[in-house]
Image (cartoon, coloured by chain):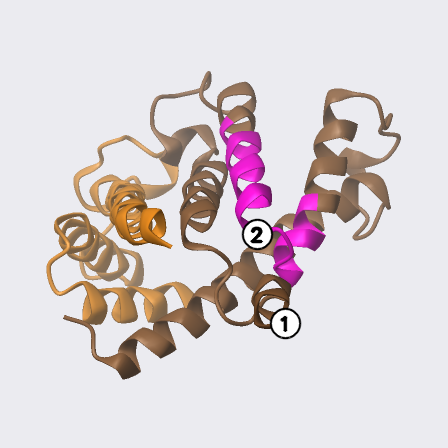
């Protein structure tokens, strides 16, 4: 069906961008303290949480841009399962 | 961009995502309406209350979405339903989904919206019905 071929890929991109933004929040909150989350205060960059924050920061940014989407998504999928 | 192989795997994974999302939503419906899994928050829910009606939508929608029957209209309704849930229950607390506890509702909303356009993929009752 033709409308599907037009809209499904575009909505897929919107879904990708939203997921990237939501993930990016975690990276920003953990590493830069914004938005401020009580649980993430005084977080060390080289702790398990800090490294997860780096994944979320870099992965979220790449996902929003849609750069290297497939490998990035695969790595983030693994990070979430961990 | 897409090899045929990547596309056919992608479609199967679309169905897997649909089934997992449907089952996750179904939990909320069964917890509210059938009391399983037992959630103290949802004991003594009136079926005609806002939460009860929400539970009915989650129960029926979750089942249909999981088996992939009428995927598109069901996904569209569930997308609207989860959007309302986000704004009713979460958006007032904070602008950031990270802080207002509504990120799951937001993700549900956009995932369902995508399925409204993409359909349920090859592993769905819709696909079986189309083949006949």
Q: Hey, which quadrant is residue B6 in on the image?
A: bottom left
Q: Is residue A81 visible?
A: yes
Chain A color in figure: orange
Q: Estimate the x, y position of residue B132 in percent, counting from the top left.
A: 63, 72
Q: Between residue A54 and residue B49, name the one nearer to us.
A: B49
Q: Chain of mark 2?
A: B
Q: Which residue is mark 2?
A: B71
Question: Label 2 crowding class (10 Å Cα cut-off): few <14, some 14-19, many 20+?
Answer: many
Q: CA distance from mark 2 to mark 1?
A: 17 Å
Q: Secondary structure at mark 1?
A: loop
Horizontally, residue B73 falls left or right of residue B32, namely left
Q: Which residue is mark 1?
A: B132
Q: Estimate the x, y position of residue B59 in percent, counting from the top left.
A: 74, 45
Disc sitting over residue A38 in the figure? none
Q: Quadrant of the N terminus of chain B?
A: bottom left
Q: Residue furthest front?
A: B132
Q: Is residue A82 visible?
A: no
Q: Estimate the x, y position of residue B58 in percent, counting from the top left.
A: 69, 41
Q: Between residue B61 and residue A75, name the one nearer to us.
A: B61
Q: Which residues are magenta?
A: B61-83
Q: Residue at x 57, y 42 (%)?
A: B73
Label the brown chain with its letter: B
Q: Residue at x 53, y 47 (%)?
A: B72
Q: Nearer the viewer, mark 2 or mark 1?
A: 1
Q: Estimate the x, y position of residue A34 in percent, counting from the top left.
A: 22, 32
Vertical relation: A24 (above or below) B92: below
């Amino acid at each position: 069906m033709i409308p599907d071929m037009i809209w499904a890929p575009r909505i897929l991109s919107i879904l990708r961008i939203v997921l990237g933004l939501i993930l990016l929040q975690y990276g920003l909150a953990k590493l830069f303290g914004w938005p401020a989350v009580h649980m993430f205060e005084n977080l060390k960059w080289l702790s398990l949480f800090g490294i997860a924050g780096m994944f979320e920061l870099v992965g979220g940014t790449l996902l929003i841009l849609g750069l290297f989407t497939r490998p990035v998504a695969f790595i983030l999928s693994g990070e979430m399962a961990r | 961009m897409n090899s045929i192989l990547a596309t056919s795997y992608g479609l199967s994974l679309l169905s897997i995502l649909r089934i997992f999302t449907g089952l996750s939503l179904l939990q909320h419906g069964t917890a509210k309406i059938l009391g399983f899994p037992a959630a103290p928050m949802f004991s003594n829910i009136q079926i005609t209350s806002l939460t009860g009606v929400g539970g009915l939508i989650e129960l029926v929608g979750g089942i249909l979405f999981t088996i992939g029957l009428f995927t598109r209209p069901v996904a569209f309704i569930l997308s609207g339903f989860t959007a309302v849930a986000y704004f009713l229950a979460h958006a007032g607390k904070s602008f950031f989904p990270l802080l207002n506890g509504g990120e799951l509702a937001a993700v549900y909303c956009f995932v369902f919206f995508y399925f409204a356009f993409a359909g349920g993929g090859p592993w769905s009752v819709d696909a079986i019905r189309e083949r006949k």
